[in-house]
Image (cartoon, grey):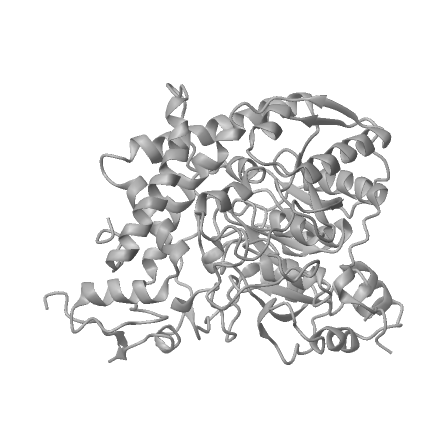
Amino acid sequence: MARLARLELSEEDVERMAGELSNILEHVERISSLDLDGVEPTTHVVVLENVLRADEPRPSLPRETALEQAPDPADGAFRVPSPQA
Amino acid sequence: MSAGIRELTAAGAIGRIEAGELSPGDLRDAYAQAPDELGAYLERLSEGGEPAAGELRGLPVAVKDIFCTEGVPTTAGSKILEGYRPPYTATAVQRLADAGANVLGKTNMDEFAMGSSNENSAYGPVRNPWDIGRVPGGSSGGSAAAVAGRLAPAAIGTDTGGSIRQPASLCGIVGLKPTYGAISRYGMIAFASSLDQCGPLTRDVTDAALLLRAMQGADTCDSTCVGIEAGVELPSREDLKGLRIGVASDFSHQVEGVEPGVADVFERSLEMIRELGAEVGECELPHAEHGISAYYVLAPAEASANLARYDGVRYGLRADGDGELVAMYERTRAAGFGPEVKRRIMLGTYALSSGYYDAYYGRAQRVRTKIAEDFTTAFEGFDLIATPTSPSVAFELGARTKDPLAMYLSDYFTVPMSLAGIPAISIPAGLAEPPGGGPQLPVGLQLTSPAFTESSLLDAAHALERAVAFDGRPPTLGEEA
């Protein structure tokens, strides 16, 4: 699970968290006793459909500004270690 | 010269400025020079600049550090964003500035708004001005402590499951979570996008209405933000005649550990509501008690997706991955996130993982529907529903850090309204002695109403506030400043 979440956890972390998470999940599992057949899931509380704007070019964040906070900018882009390494 | 300035409400200070009795500069200085002994601020701005002309007249406002402010460090209480300076300003903050407000500083908070005590901040705890050995609540703990502790006349925060209302309750101030979609989320660092909502933390209900009025409204940068079509009226009501107020006894009594002091203040508030002319009746919210369970699936699930962006590539911290991309991600996130954020990312990743999705996420979304339907049904018979805001008064620093579930239950009364997307306000209702003794501490009352009915919610809260006549000045502050 930690791999999926891209989190490096130590042995102690894993042990402590396993206990805490099963405690929380036990509480959460109370909802398994409810009869929810035929109930629609809520993904969003405001009923909205297709909020669109005209597809017109507009100014956006300049490249230099977007790169200003990057840990390792290079050649006008974000540099990262090779995914194939 | 500055005696009493920091005792003024926002509306009071604006009135003095309009009458030519106080200058915006002196008002700002009175706050900017006050020592922050509570740890409420992460960053105090040395200058406010010339305020825009507008109805807020240069009012200084404290802003939770979850709102992006152009060029001003914005951390969301996390090490992963240490030193981050956003290239733009959040709509809510911009609207306040356009209305004449002046940002005093950025307030401390639980990391990424995950917490109910402010102890999950990477930058240290915030102290409750009523008892500095106790927490201010969270996650908007810095904003609440600043307003209660006379370090800001008003503040803004965010509420995902109670993060404005619970700290307001614990600090003896007013906290409003507007309807989902009332205020733009643009530039507000995302925790759980279907629940996050910005709102004011203030000394009284009128001030909450003033800030809400300035911030609300549709925004092309947040397609889920529709604004309050009817606008926001400043409250004027002095009684509750003709109103029907619902109390869900089953819900209010299910929680383990509503403190006796909180229950007493709640009963007294209901008595006061009756004396003001409202009819108090029993309403049913049969699924509300499952709010915490649904919330702690949905919010972590959304958080696990939202926080995927902190990967050491575009901004924030980057750890060395010895030349490997995935190792860089994993180490960056391990070093940058605190324990509660990691816990929620793990919980959310689990709830969304194949094989468990239906059992957790799918069911929680259906419980959310049931909770929203409960409120819709209840509002057919009642104008407002009243609950305590928090099961407890402010607890001692460290009391719940070892038990995440106990911390989560702090939000028992506030989470259902967040899931339903409806507005809810906490106002100070009285004082109660904490279990184990000690000085008396504030207790909040929560009122909730149908979506986009903020004006009538604020009006009722205003009438009750007048009757309660709560003295919001923490005794620890000593002489008037």
Residue extending furthest toward the front: B436
Q: Quadrant of residue B178?
A: top right
Q: Nearer the viewer, residue B207 or A61?
A: B207
Q: Quadrant of the C terminus of chain B?
A: bottom right
Please indicate whether residue A29 sits to the left or right of residue B245 in the image. Answer: left
Please indicate whether residue B310 sits to the left or right of residue B132 in the image. Answer: left
Instruction: Please state the horizontal and vertical placement of residue B73, each as a whole percent of the image.
Output: 50, 73
The correct choice, above or below, for B477 with respect to A77 in the image is above
Residue B55 in sight from this viewpoint: no
The correct choice, above or below, for B456 with respect to B96 in the image is above
Instruction: Please state the horizontal and vertical placement of residue B118, each as a whole percent of the image.
Output: 54, 58
Instruction: Give the number of marks.
Output: 0
The correct choice, above or below, for B155 with respect to B274 in the image is below
Q: Residue at x 60, y 69 (%)?
A: B39
Q: Quadrant of the N terminus of chain B?
A: bottom right
Q: Nearer the viewer, residue B356 or B436?
A: B436
Please indicate whether residue B23 sits to the left or right of residue B323 in the image. Answer: right
Q: Residue at x 65, y 54 (%)?
A: B200
Residue B98 in sight from this viewpoint: yes
Q: Residue at x 78, y 59 (%)?
A: B473
Instruction: Please state the horizontal and vertical placement of residue B229, each as a whole percent of the image.
Output: 64, 42
Q: Nearer the viewer, residue B450 or B269?
A: B269
